[in-house]
Each structure stands twice: as C-alpha cells, then as structure tokens.
Amino acid sequence: MNVHAPKAQQLEELRSDAQDDVRALRSGIRHLSEDQIGLILTRARSHYAWQDKPVTDAQIKRIYDIAALGPTSMNCSPARFVFIKSEEAKQRLAKALKPANVPKVMGAPVTAIIAYDKDFWKELPRLFPHEDRTGHFRGKGAHAQDTAFRNSTLQGGYLMIAARAIGLDIGPISGFSNQIVDEEFFAGTSVVSNFLCNFGYADETALFQRLPRFEFDDVCSFA
C-alpha cells in the first residue's frame, strides 16, 4: 500500500487548488517581457571567467527550489546535484577535467555536478503518489537509464535558467571524464554524473562574439 497516496477527497481538493493556482498565475502575468527573456536566454551568454565574488548557500538553495518545480516525466526527478565550493573538492574535480577547463572551474565560485540516480524510480511512491509506477522501471535497466539521463538533462537546464533568473551567470561544461567524476564523488552509489556547470558573476572581458545559430527553416518543419 502506498502510504503517501492522498485519499479521494483530498485528491480532488488538491486538483482544485492546483487549477485555481494556474488560473491566478495566468491572470496576473501572461508572458515575460523581452528584457526578461533576454536575461534568461536571448541575450545571456555562457561564461568562462569569473569575478572574485562569492555565491551564497542561500542563492544555491533558491536556484534549486526554482529548478525543482520544472517538469519531468512522472515527476521522476532523477537529478542529483553536488555543488563544489571548497578548494579540496575543486582539486578532486580537476582530476576529471580536460586541461582547458581546469582554470574555468578553479576560478568559479561554484561548480555544480549535475548527476542522476539510476534507481530514481524507487522514489516514485513519494513523488507520484496517486498511482504506482515503479513497475515501469523495476528490472528494466535500459529504460530506467534512458529516463534518468533524459530527465536529469532537463533538470540541469532548469537549474541554469533559474541561476540566470536570480542574477547569476553560468558556464556549462562537458569536457571531462564522467568515470573519474563518478569515482571521486559517487563511488558505491547508484548515482552517476551527467554534466558540469559553473555558477557565479561573470568577468565579461573574457567574452568573444556570439556564435551563429541555425535559422528556423534550417532545422524546423511542420507536419
């Protein structure tokens, strides 16, 4: 029996509250302004150098609280995050980095390891309490792996947008050894790394011109 599952009347009340909340949100704000969209995506940049200005634990927790509400399939939320701040932890992480990425991490106030738990599905009774979905993944390692990787990548994206939304800059990194990161930080667990991301206040003097992007007709179609 799922002890987390709400009773029928409670479920109806929760659904009604959720619907009212969305209606209230839409009535209060229909869309972001162009400046706000620019802050999180269209004018924002990935950064490689950082000011000597700390990122607080409260900011990190705020970023997580925002990102945690982003959608994942069945609310599975497989991502696990390690926020690297100490010199000792940075040295451990540096073992996994390609040489060009070492100064980027060592100079950043915080580097997040965006990882995922391959056994995420064991938490579904807590996260998806109104229906038992554990059977979708029990004994299905490949399906669980695909689901965890896909959704943790989404959650990493939410984390980056959340950081920009509260005024921080970001610098995602994929040039590293996942194996070494996993040995250093997740040995003996069901958690494995996905990608890295630096957080802080950028030193804009290291920026170069924005690189090209595809036009809509290059990569999009209607069916």
Image (spheres, grey):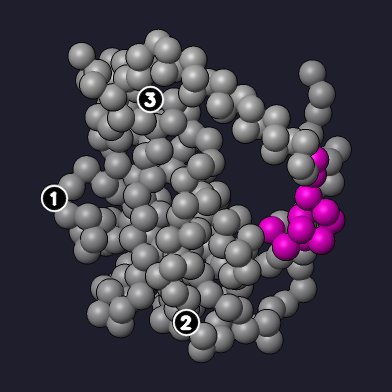
Instruction: Please state which amino acid type lies under the numbered disc 3.
Output: Phe
Indicate the position of residue 181 as horizontal and vertical percent values. 29, 61
Is 129 placed left or right of 44 in the picture?
A: left
Q: Above or below — where is 71 with respect to 103?
A: above
Instruction: Please state which amino acid type lies under the numbered disc 1.
Output: Gly
Indicate the position of residue 57 as horizontal and vertical percent values. 40, 70
The stretch in magenta equals 30-40
The mark tally for this picture is: 3
Q: Residue furthest top?
A: 8
Which residue is depicted at the point 35% across and 75% down? 85
* Residue at numbered disc 1: 188
Q: Secondary structure at mark 1?
A: loop
Q: Secondary structure at mark 2?
A: loop
Alpha carbon of mark 2 to alpha carbon of mark 3: how far?
37 Å
* Residue at numbered disc 2: 54
Sort mark 3 into few (<14), some (14-19) or many (20+) by Cα contacts within 10 Å.
some
Point out the frontmost of discs 1 and 2.
2
Q: Nearer the viewer, residue 176 or 129?
A: 129
Which residue is depicted at the point 82% across and 24% down? 222
Task: Give the number of the disc on residue 3.
Answer: none
Q: Quadrant of the C terminus?
A: top right
* Residue at numbered disc 3: 128
Q: Residue furthest left?
A: 188
Residue 34 part of the magenta-drawn span:
yes
Q: Secondary structure at mark 3?
A: loop
Mark closest to the chain's N terminus, 2 or 3: 2
Q: Nearer the viewer, residue 123 or 25?
A: 25
Mark closest to the chain's N terminus, 1 or 2: 2
Indicate the position of residue 51 as horizontal and vertical percent values. 56, 86
Sort mark 2 into few (<14), some (14-19) or many (20+) by Cα contacts within 10 Å.
few
